[in-house]
Image (tube, rainbow, N blue to C red):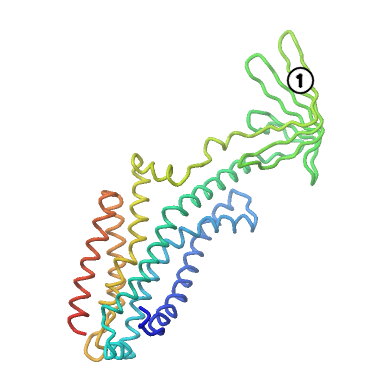
Amino acid sequence: MGRIPKFFINNFFKVFIPLFFTLFFIASIMFFIMIARFTSYLSLSFAELGEMFIYLLPKIIIYTLPVSFFVSMAITAFNMSKESENIVLFSFGYSPKKMAKVYFFLAFFTTLFLLINSIFILPISKQLYKNFLQIKRVEAKINIKPTEFGQKFSDWIVFINRADNKGYKDIILYNQKKSKDTFILANHAKLNKKEGLLNLSLDSGKVFYIQKDSIRQIDFLKMNINNFLSAGNLRDENVFEYWLRAASDKKRAKDFSFLILISAFPMVSYLFALAIATVHIRHDRVRIYPYLFALIIAYYVISVIFAKSFPFIGIFIVPLIFYLISKSMFGYRVLRRF
């Protein structure tokens, strides 16, 4: 590999970097539009929008990197054919097989990165994204305002006399369970998040337990009341537990299969790129772009079909079939002619 001229790889990255960032930018705009719709019913700051976008980065990468890599390989090979650089390489003994080896290593490391992103990073980011939305939905439901009746926090009915930048003043909470009524009076309260849950922190107050024949009073300096509304819906699975559900969950199995197939696309497509784009510029009709788009659409459509109907079988069948076709096509269109 060290004998391959540096410009061979440099030409690839000159095409790949701007193409990847262009597709990444377009995809980012689409995902930002998707995020923006949450602002119609959730109060989100600019920092929180940025946090949501970070959680979506692995998903954006899985949609943009395989396509940009494949198209960049084809454009690089075509540019070298157009500038007769491949003829110079062949005349110096750099056969198409050696050219293919360079792209093989690039495709291998790209696929490896995509697999790590899909299997390990994406499940974590997806859970963080959904947990973030769940917490924000709970916060939207719990918008406690001063001097308003009928407000609730968890199982408690809340009344607040006044509020300032530091929190709430003169707060009353009421809860009724069976034959016991509970009142909490506090001088100060603050609403905050703690470990993914909403927490109401009370300072300097009293608790009254009222029953038919007794009233009990407890004084306190500090009291915390957690809102458990979101606890049951928060996701806290490790990567193994997340994908283990694919054995019984059809949607999870489909996601797993589709992500593996898309991650494998650089490895099964690099020979296609060379076969399509390595041409005699004076003798061949140049139609690489229709072939590129047709191949991308075909692979993605077949991947979706197999991921939905035969998820675990498709992981092996689809890449194998496409790789065998690409190898035959590379031998027929390139090795036989150059």
Category of crowding for the residue at label 1, using alpha-carbon neighbours closer than 10 angstroms: few (below 14), some (14–19), many (at least 20)? some
Quarter of the image for residue 325 reads: bottom left
Quarter of the image for residue 87 reads: bottom left
Q: Nearer the viewer, residue 41 or 155?
A: 155
* Picture coordinates of residue 72, whole percent (x, y): 38, 75
* Picture coordinates of residue 133, whole percent (x, y): 55, 47
* Picture coordinates of residue 187, whole percent (x, y): 82, 33
Q: Nearer the viewer, residue 44 or 3?
A: 3
Image position of 175 (left or right of 3) = right
Quarter of the image for residue 20 reads: bottom left
Residue plotted at (41% across, 82% down): 11
In the rendered view of the protein, which quadrant contains the C terminus? bottom left
In the rendered view of the protein, which quadrant contains the N terminus? bottom left
Q: Residue furthest front?
A: 2
Q: Nearer the viewer, residue 80 or 113?
A: 113
Q: Amino acid at mark 1?
A: Phe
Residue plotted at (39% across, 62% down): 112
Residue plotted at (45% across, 53% down): 120
Where disc 1 sits, the SS reads strand
Image position of 305 (left or right of 240) = left
Residue picked out by circle 1: 208
